[in-house]
Amino acid sequence: MITRWLPAAAQWLQIDWVLLVVGAWLLIGVAGVLALRRLTLVARVLFPLGGAFGLALAGIALSAALSSPEVAVLPIGLPGLPFHFRLDSLSAFFLIVIGSVSAGVSAFAAGYFRKGEGTPPGLLAFEYHLFLASMALVVVADDAYAFMVMWETMALSSFFLVTANHRIVEIQRAGYLYLLIAHIGAISILLCFGVLQANTGDYTFANMRAQQLSPFWASLAFLLALVGFGAKAGILPLHVWLPEAHPAAPSPVSALMSGVMLKTAIYGVLRVFFDLLDTPLWWWGLLLLVVGLATALFGVVFAAVQVDMKRLLAYSSIENIGLLFAAIGLAVLFSAYGMQPMAALALTAVLYHVAGHAFFKSLLFVGTGAVLHATGERNLGKLGGLIRTMPWVAWAMLVGVLASAGLPPLAGFVSEWLLLQSFLFSPALPSAFLNMLIPVVAALIALIAALAGYTMVKFFGIIFLGQPREEKLALARDASGWERIGMAWLVCGCVLLGLFPVQFIALIDPVTRSLIGAGMADTVAAGGWLLVPVAIERASYGPAIFLLGVAASFALAFVLVRTLYHGRLRRAAPWDCGYPWQNARMQDTAEGFGQPIRQIFEPFFRMERELPTPFDTEPRYRVSVGDHFWHWLYLPLARAVERLASAIGLLQQGRIAVYLLYSFATLIAVLVVVKQ
Amino acid sequence: MTELVGQLINLFAAILLMLSFAMISQRRILSLIHLFTAQGITLVAATVLVGYATHQPHLYVSAGITLALKVILIPLLLYRVINRLDVRWDVETLINIPMTMVIGIALVIFAFNLALPISKLSVSVARGTLGIALACVLLSFMMMITRSKAVPQVIGFLSMENGLFFAATSATYGMPMVVELGIALDVLVGILILGVFMFHIREEFDSLDISHLEKLKED
């Protein structure tokens, strides 16, 4: 082992370099602890350095994605229980996402953190880089022990990041909720690994791959993994922590949690379903499909009615996670029926969306951070017109919003296109029952995509367009230099992912080949620059052509307008409908924008309204939208636990004699049992 | 010769049991300490005898430790504590003495019943005494429950350890030396900590009556 580390760096494997980057992140974190309160050093040196290492990690993973799997064993941890690591194409793909997205977020964070916001900056740097390192190690872990250690490190470091402003009561509550659900998930994952090792006592993933489980045990492992990873990803009904924790965390942290950490849960799902479990059963796919679509619809409907910009984005993340789970379900269905090429298409859509969502959601979250710092407001109702004072942020956010709404030629469109194509194949499934579901599913997907667009129009329009709703918004300052670099990098990611799908699918191809034995690279490559999901004559998409078309028609329109109308321009005051006193309060508000959705989807919400009477001198209107799951599931559960706890509390008498009597009675009872 | 040794061990076991009963019925703390010392002496004698009969030299060592700890050191410590705290003439039990004795007899019958199948498996010379040892443990435990003051409870705890030690000696010729040393250390540290606690309880509540500790309960 030692001898392998000594030779010249030229002989190092790619996985050694990955571990080196992780080590560098940890060292940066330690440096942060040493420079606890020196903000300039931490922000200007440590965070950019961490971002540079993120880029390096993405580069290493890029070359590893196309080469064969590598393993490494680190003799740390418990004696006789070393950490196993393995770098295969799936891990490499997720490392690319982690590395490249974290580079942008780190650059943004370099300009974001300030004094006096709770945790000292050095400690934040430590937690932040520990978080990054643990995420990278989660995706390369090759035994249950290393995986769980890293998984929990990830949960704990992100918990401390979420509670950076720990003096605020809501943030404490959000952190507690997050930690609680993270632990429920971790227990479930642990049990899942326990089932997967099939009583051999060997917890390496290699052993789990070799085990042949009976359908019952395999299904149990599937369900445990679904609950465990679903808790981290935020599927229904384990989603409640997302809309609490994301607004509570500092924006770069929300960006990492939503953009990257949720993806580690997707990684875990793919690893368990397609790699560790050998043959999937068809009903797993159906369950995933139903849960995923329900989550997506729930998320997007709630996103449409939010008035807090970070909560809105959190619900939008729930929606995207739902879509990912639905697509994974489709891949499972196809592969259960032996239709590997279709499964590869669905899985490609999943991985593409993982990368795309990581970029655009991180971009949107860091953008909200910039707005939050410039204005001090998270409430959409107090923003507006910021495109004039913060043009940088506004244009960057516009790209993110378009990508999030799934418009071409950006990242979101490619993955949704692939996803829809794979859904259109589902009539080929040899099951009449499943075929009957398809129209419903297709309608749901269309509805979700449309509502996502609606939500994004609301998000961008209310924040950046129109008139400022508050006086102080005129003083808002645009993003600082480092923040601009970070956002520009994320914008580049969204655009490039949108423009070069063929080249990116070449990276995904080895992953789908190793997981389900089929890939899309051949069909895709046949189209040259065209993205060809199935065959060239069916549903091909050329982003470059599209972009050229859009640009050409814009140019044409511009030229036409200039030549035909130029010089005939007349400026005059528009008709003001007979009401000349217009002010910012007459614009559509966030509540108003979401009102139709609130009406249509009323059964989804638990609404509390306070309507003013006509005679109020100071009329107040208040509406709050609650989550049914909270009242139907979580509160009854909490009350039951409390009742149980107080029943057990009766045992606590405070008298030593009584306590001794308990031990005595137990002893006698045990002795009697032994005697039998 | 073996016959005689066996008889002697049985005798010591009987004395141990008698002393346990005496401790249950004793109200005065000073007498309790005397009884505890006597129990220790009996234990030492029994251990030496078993060691002599079975040629197990390590039993002499454990007998030595017992002598130093339970016959000399701990009683001395307890004397000092009760002198300093001035609680030599303590009374009061939670259940009255005759009632405790009746429960004690039931416990002894239970212990004998329990030890019967185990004794049959054992090859030790002292196998018949396992029931007595168990009875001593249970009786001391009961003493801890029925006393309301701190010092008798501590003595009950120590006497329970005596019973355990005797059980180990009689069933398997004693525990491994490491375990025995560990237990001896435990008892010593335990008694020191309990001593400190007694002073603190006294300081806090002006009494050693542990019913005051009920106030510490969280509502």
Image (cartoon, coloured by chain):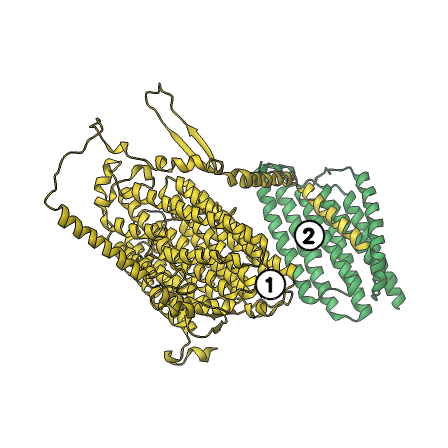
Chain colours: A yellow, B green
Mark number displayed over residue B98? none
Quadrant (top left, top right, bottom left, bottom right) of the C terminus of chain A: bottom right
Q: Position of residue B168 (x, y in %)?
A: 76, 61
Report whether A647 appears left or right of A251: right
Dot 1 and dot 2 within a common chain: no
Report whether A246 appears left or right of B125: left
Q: Kindly identify the residue that appears in the image at 76 percent across and 55 percent down.
A: B163
Q: Looking at the picture, does residue A229 appear above or below residue A68?
A: above
What residue does disc 1 label? Answer: A196
Q: Kindly identify the residue that appears in the image at 46 percent across and 46 percent down.
A: A297
Image mark count: 2
Amino acid, disc 1:
Leu
Amino acid, disc 2:
Pro
- Label 1: state its secondary structure: helix
Mark number displayed over residue B75? 2
Q: Residues within 10 Å of mark 1 (few under 14, many from 20)?
A: many
Residue furthest toward the top? A615
Report whether A284 appears left or right of B6: left
Of B69 and A408, nearer the camera is A408
Q: Looking at the picture, does residue B27 appear above or below residue A71?
A: above
Report whether A132 appears left or right of A558: right
Q: Position of residue A98 (x, y in %)?
A: 39, 61
Q: Is residue B127 visible?
A: yes
What is the C-alpha distance between the residues marked 1 and 2? 58 Å
Q: Looking at the picture, does residue B68 appear above or below residue A69?
A: above
Q: Residues within 10 Å of mark 2 (few under 14, many from 20)?
A: some
Q: Position of residue A1 (x, y in %)?
A: 48, 77
Q: Chain of mark 1?
A: A
- Label 2: state its secondary structure: helix
Q: Kindly identify the residue that appears in the image at 31 percent across and 64 percent down.
A: A52
| Comparing labels 1 and 2, the label whose residue is closer to the camera | 1
